Image (tube, rainbow, N blue to C red):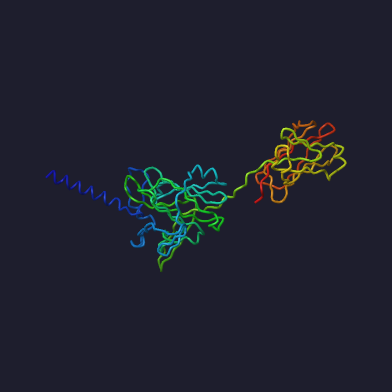
Amino acid sequence: MKKIYTLRYFFMAFLLILTSCSKDENEAIVESEKTIIEPDFIKNDGTEGLKEEVLQEEEAPTPTEVNAKSYRHYNYTLLKPSDLTQTDVDSIACGNITKMPLLVGSRKQKVGHVTVSNDGENLYLTFKAKRRNLMKKVYLYIGAKDNIPFYSNGFPNLRKFNYKAFPYYYGGTKEATYIIPLSSIDLDCFEIVAYAKIYNKDSRCFYTSFAYDQERTQQYNYYYGCIHYGTWVRSFEYCKQQCQDPCIQAYGYHEECGLCENDVFNTFFAYTFLDNRGTAGVNVEILINPNGCDITNSQEVGHLNISSISESKLRIEYQLNSGYEMCELNFNYGISRFDTPNNYSQQFSMPTTSHAFEIEKLTGANIYVDSKALVTPAN
C-alpha cells in the first residue's frame, strides 16, 4: 500500500511539473530562480483572447537575398549579430545612450536589458539576457508610433515587425549587438518595440519579454466590433543623437608680424600701430594643419581682430569662416617675445562662429600674443 501511495504522489508531482510550464513563448518568467511561476503572469502577458493559430511562431526562413526578406507576405530585414561588444559600441556612440530593461509579465520581471545608441552612420541595439536566461529570437519594430502593427486585442503582431533575428546557437545566445543603418530610418525620433523570446535554463521554458520605458505614460486604444480591448504599454522612444566632429587645434598667425619657434606661433604689434588703426584694428589669420612652423599647406578657417578701443583697452574678436565653428579659444599675451603669461580662455557649451572680449593694455611698447582656438566643421 505504501508503494502505491508513493507512486501516486510521484505521478501528481510529475503532472504539476508538466502543467507549470507549457513552453509557450507567450508565458512569463519570474526573476527568482526558486519562485513558482504564477498563473497571472501567463494570463496578463497580452496574448489573452488570441487564437492558437494566430500565436503560432514562424520558423526562420531560408533567404536567398541579403537583407531583403519576405516570409508569408511580410517584408522585413533579417539581422545578424555583429562582432562588436557593448564596450566597442559605447566608445563610438554619440550623445546619450539609452538602456531599457527586458521585462516579462504584468509584474515586470527583469530577464535582461536592451541598450540603444548611434554614431554618425548606424543605430546599435545590444540585447543582453541576465542570469540563467538565453535569447532565442529577437523581433524589432522601429518607426512611427502610429504604425506599430497590432492584433485586434492590442498585442503586437510580431510577424509584421520590420526587423527580425533568429537563433544562431543551440539553446540561444546570451548577448548580441545588431547594427541598422541610420539612412534606413527616415525619422529623427521614433518608437522602438523590442521583443526577445527568452529561454530559461532552469525551467526549460520560453517566455515573452519586451524592453520598455516604465516611467513613461502611453496608451494604445483598440476596438474590435463593439469590444474595447484596453491599452498596451510596452515600447519606448529613441531620438537620433547628434554627433559632433572632433575639434582640432587652430593657431593665430600674422604673416608679416608673426614669429614661430619650436612650433609656437607668436604675433606682436606696437601699441602705437594699433592706436593708429583705431577701431578698425588689424586681422590675424586663424590657421589649421600647419607642419610645425611651416604654414605652406595650412588652411585659413577664420581670423581674430585686435583693435584699440581706448587708451587702456584692446578689443579681441574671433570670427570663423563659413563652414567652421569654435569649440574653445585660448588667448595668451605678454610684453616679451614668446613670454605670454596673461590669459583669456573660453569653452563653449555649443560651438559658435564668433566671440569677442576686452583686455587691459600692458605696460610697455609692444604686445605679443599666442592665440589658439579649437575648431570643428559646422553641421
Residue 105 seen by the camera: no
Picture coordinates of residue 368, whole percent (x, y)? 79, 35
Name the residue nearer the viewer: 24 or 47. 24
Position of the N terminus by quadrant:
top left
Q: Residue at x 62, y 46 (%)?
A: 245
Decide: is 125 above or below 345.
Answer: below
Decide: is 38 above or below 262.
Answer: below
Picture coordinates of residue 7, whole percent (x, y)? 17, 46
Name the residue nearer the viewer: 365 or 202. 365
- Most extreme residue toward the left is 1
Q: Quadrant of residue 151?
A: bottom left
Name the residue nearer the viewer: 214 or 199. 199
Q: How many marks?
A: 0
Picture coordinates of residue 15, whole percent (x, y)? 23, 50
- Most extreme residue toward the bottom is 225
Q: Is residue 194 left or right of residue 280?
A: left
Q: Is residue 43 left or right of residue 14?
A: right
Decide: is 327 above or below 191.
Answer: above
Q: Residue at x 53, y 57 (%)?
A: 185
Picture coordinates of residue 138, whole percent (x, y)? 42, 53
Residue 263 seen by the camera: yes
